[in-house]
Amino acid sequence: MKRFFLMLLVVMSNLAMAQMEKAEIIATGLTCSMCSKAIYKQLLKIPEVEKVDTNLEANSFMIYLKKDNHIKPNVLKNKVEEAGFFVGSLIAFLPTNTLVANGFNKLNQENVTFEVLEGSFIKNSISTKVKILDKGFVTSKEYNTDLKSINKLLQKEIQGQEVYHVKIIQ
Protein backbone atom coordinates (compact mmCIF):
# COMPACT_ATOMS: atom_id res chain seq x y z
CA MET A 1 0.00 0.00 0.00
CA LYS A 2 2.84 2.39 0.86
CA ARG A 3 4.45 1.61 -2.47
CA PHE A 4 1.24 2.51 -4.32
CA PHE A 5 0.99 5.90 -2.62
CA LEU A 6 4.66 6.60 -3.29
CA MET A 7 4.20 5.82 -6.99
CA LEU A 8 1.07 7.97 -7.09
CA LEU A 9 2.96 10.87 -5.50
CA VAL A 10 5.79 10.58 -8.07
CA VAL A 11 3.32 10.53 -10.99
CA MET A 12 1.41 13.54 -9.63
CA SER A 13 4.59 15.54 -9.04
CA ASN A 14 5.71 14.86 -12.62
CA LEU A 15 2.37 16.11 -13.94
CA ALA A 16 2.94 19.48 -12.30
CA MET A 17 6.52 19.92 -13.58
CA ALA A 18 5.85 21.58 -16.93
CA GLN A 19 5.22 25.28 -17.12
CA MET A 20 4.06 27.44 -19.98
CA GLU A 21 4.02 25.95 -23.47
CA LYS A 22 4.16 29.38 -25.05
CA ALA A 23 3.38 32.99 -24.30
CA GLU A 24 2.17 35.93 -26.32
CA ILE A 25 3.42 39.37 -25.39
CA ILE A 26 2.12 42.62 -26.79
CA ALA A 27 4.75 45.27 -26.11
CA THR A 28 4.17 49.00 -25.73
CA GLY A 29 6.40 51.89 -26.71
CA LEU A 30 7.68 50.41 -29.99
CA THR A 31 8.12 52.87 -32.85
CA CYS A 32 10.09 50.92 -35.46
CA SER A 33 11.42 47.52 -36.49
CA MET A 34 14.65 48.17 -34.54
CA CYS A 35 12.59 48.38 -31.34
CA SER A 36 11.02 45.04 -32.15
CA LYS A 37 14.42 43.54 -32.88
CA ALA A 38 15.73 44.68 -29.49
CA ILE A 39 12.94 42.80 -27.70
CA TYR A 40 13.38 39.79 -29.99
CA LYS A 41 17.09 39.56 -29.11
CA GLN A 42 16.42 39.85 -25.37
CA LEU A 43 13.78 37.10 -25.47
CA LEU A 44 16.12 34.76 -27.35
CA LYS A 45 18.70 35.14 -24.56
CA ILE A 46 16.41 33.20 -22.21
CA PRO A 47 17.62 29.57 -22.12
CA GLU A 48 14.07 28.17 -21.95
CA VAL A 49 13.02 29.94 -25.18
CA GLU A 50 12.98 27.74 -28.26
CA LYS A 51 11.70 30.24 -30.83
CA VAL A 52 10.19 33.73 -31.08
CA ASP A 53 7.83 34.88 -33.83
CA THR A 54 7.21 38.60 -34.19
CA ASN A 55 4.30 40.52 -35.65
CA LEU A 56 5.44 44.08 -36.35
CA GLU A 57 1.92 45.35 -37.10
CA ALA A 58 0.56 44.21 -33.73
CA ASN A 59 3.80 44.72 -31.75
CA SER A 60 3.38 41.15 -30.58
CA PHE A 61 5.78 38.33 -29.86
CA MET A 62 4.80 34.66 -29.73
CA ILE A 63 7.36 32.91 -27.54
CA TYR A 64 7.64 29.13 -27.89
CA LEU A 65 9.20 27.51 -24.87
CA LYS A 66 11.22 24.34 -24.57
CA LYS A 67 9.48 21.28 -23.19
CA ASP A 68 9.66 20.87 -19.40
CA ASN A 69 10.81 24.46 -18.89
CA HIS A 70 10.59 26.13 -15.49
CA ILE A 71 10.21 29.74 -16.61
CA LYS A 72 8.07 32.20 -14.71
CA PRO A 73 6.12 35.04 -16.37
CA ASN A 74 8.33 37.61 -14.58
CA VAL A 75 11.36 36.46 -16.58
CA LEU A 76 9.63 37.32 -19.87
CA LYS A 77 8.45 40.69 -18.56
CA ASN A 78 11.92 41.56 -17.29
CA LYS A 79 13.53 40.81 -20.67
CA VAL A 80 11.08 43.13 -22.45
CA GLU A 81 11.92 45.83 -19.89
CA GLU A 82 15.67 45.21 -20.33
CA ALA A 83 15.17 46.03 -24.01
CA GLY A 84 13.70 49.38 -22.91
CA PHE A 85 9.99 48.66 -23.42
CA PHE A 86 6.93 47.55 -21.46
CA VAL A 87 4.48 44.67 -21.55
CA GLY A 88 0.98 45.75 -22.55
CA SER A 89 -0.39 42.23 -22.37
CA LEU A 90 0.98 38.78 -21.52
CA ILE A 91 -1.05 35.71 -22.36
CA ALA A 92 0.30 32.37 -21.18
CA PHE A 93 -0.65 29.02 -22.70
CA LEU A 94 -0.61 26.38 -19.96
CA PRO A 95 -0.89 22.65 -20.68
CA THR A 96 -4.13 21.76 -18.93
CA ASN A 97 -2.93 18.28 -17.93
CA THR A 98 -0.21 19.87 -15.76
CA LEU A 99 -2.57 22.13 -13.83
CA VAL A 100 -3.72 21.22 -10.38
CA ALA A 101 -6.96 22.96 -9.48
CA ASN A 102 -6.75 24.08 -5.87
CA GLY A 103 -10.36 24.90 -5.14
CA PHE A 104 -12.21 26.87 -7.81
CA ASN A 105 -9.96 29.89 -8.08
CA LYS A 106 -6.35 28.67 -8.06
CA LEU A 107 -4.27 26.78 -10.60
CA ASN A 108 -0.91 25.53 -9.39
CA GLN A 109 2.15 24.63 -11.41
CA GLU A 110 5.39 23.76 -9.64
CA ASN A 111 6.50 27.05 -8.03
CA VAL A 112 3.80 29.29 -9.52
CA THR A 113 0.19 29.81 -8.52
CA PHE A 114 -2.28 31.33 -10.98
CA GLU A 115 -5.16 32.85 -9.03
CA VAL A 116 -8.20 33.05 -11.30
CA LEU A 117 -10.12 36.32 -11.02
CA GLU A 118 -12.26 35.79 -14.14
CA GLY A 119 -13.26 32.79 -16.22
CA SER A 120 -13.62 29.08 -15.63
CA PHE A 121 -11.09 26.28 -15.73
CA ILE A 122 -12.06 23.75 -18.41
CA LYS A 123 -10.67 20.42 -17.27
CA ASN A 124 -10.92 18.53 -20.61
CA SER A 125 -9.23 21.13 -22.81
CA ILE A 126 -5.68 20.56 -24.06
CA SER A 127 -4.40 24.02 -23.20
CA THR A 128 -5.58 26.75 -20.85
CA LYS A 129 -4.99 30.28 -22.07
CA VAL A 130 -4.67 32.90 -19.32
CA LYS A 131 -4.10 36.64 -19.37
CA ILE A 132 -1.99 37.88 -16.48
CA LEU A 133 -3.63 40.91 -14.86
CA ASP A 134 -0.95 42.04 -12.41
CA LYS A 135 0.84 45.41 -12.60
CA GLY A 136 3.51 45.34 -15.30
CA PHE A 137 1.65 42.69 -17.31
CA VAL A 138 -1.13 44.97 -18.59
CA THR A 139 -1.12 48.59 -19.70
CA SER A 140 -1.08 51.25 -16.99
CA LYS A 141 -4.51 52.42 -18.12
CA GLU A 142 -6.01 48.91 -17.82
CA TYR A 143 -4.36 48.36 -14.45
CA ASN A 144 -5.47 51.73 -13.04
CA THR A 145 -9.02 51.37 -14.35
CA ASP A 146 -9.76 47.77 -13.49
CA LEU A 147 -7.27 46.29 -11.10
CA LYS A 148 -5.54 48.79 -8.85
CA SER A 149 -8.11 48.63 -6.07
CA ILE A 150 -8.29 44.84 -5.90
CA ASN A 151 -4.59 44.10 -6.51
CA LYS A 152 -3.67 45.70 -3.16
CA LEU A 153 -5.75 43.03 -1.44
CA LEU A 154 -4.37 40.07 -3.38
CA GLN A 155 -1.46 37.92 -2.27
CA LYS A 156 1.83 38.13 -4.17
CA GLU A 157 3.30 34.97 -2.66
CA ILE A 158 1.86 31.79 -1.15
CA GLN A 159 4.26 29.48 0.68
CA GLY A 160 7.27 30.43 -1.46
CA GLN A 161 5.33 30.38 -4.73
CA GLU A 162 4.93 33.40 -6.97
CA VAL A 163 1.28 34.31 -7.45
CA TYR A 164 -0.11 35.70 -10.69
CA HIS A 165 -3.70 36.92 -10.97
CA VAL A 166 -5.27 35.83 -14.22
CA LYS A 167 -8.31 35.80 -16.40
CA ILE A 168 -8.96 32.52 -18.23
CA ILE A 169 -9.50 33.05 -21.95
CA GLN A 170 -10.92 30.21 -24.08
Image: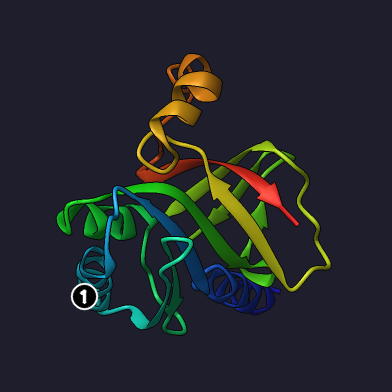
Q: x, y percentage for residue 44?
A: 26, 78
Q: Dot 1: within a 10 Å radius of its alpha carbon, few (fewer than 14), some, or many (20 or more) residues?
A: some
* Residue 151 in the image: above or below residue 110: above
In the rendered image, the quadrant that contains the N terminus is bottom right
The image's colour scheme reads rainbow
| Three-letter residue code for mark 1 | Lys
Residue 149 visible within the image: yes
Residue 46 as seen in the image, left or right of residue 105: left
Residue displayed at 55% across by 67% down? 16
Residue displayed at 53% across by 60% down? 92
Residue displayed at 71% across by 40% down? 103
Residue 30 as seen in the image, left or right of residue 157: left
Q: Nearer the viewer, residue 68 or 16?
A: 68
* Residue 61 in the image: above or below residue 151: below
Residue 110 as seen in the image, left or right of residue 70: right
Q: Which residue is mark 1?
A: 41
* Residue 49 in the image: above or below residue 96: below
Q: x, y percentage for residue 7?
A: 62, 79
Q: x, y percentage for residue 83?
A: 17, 59
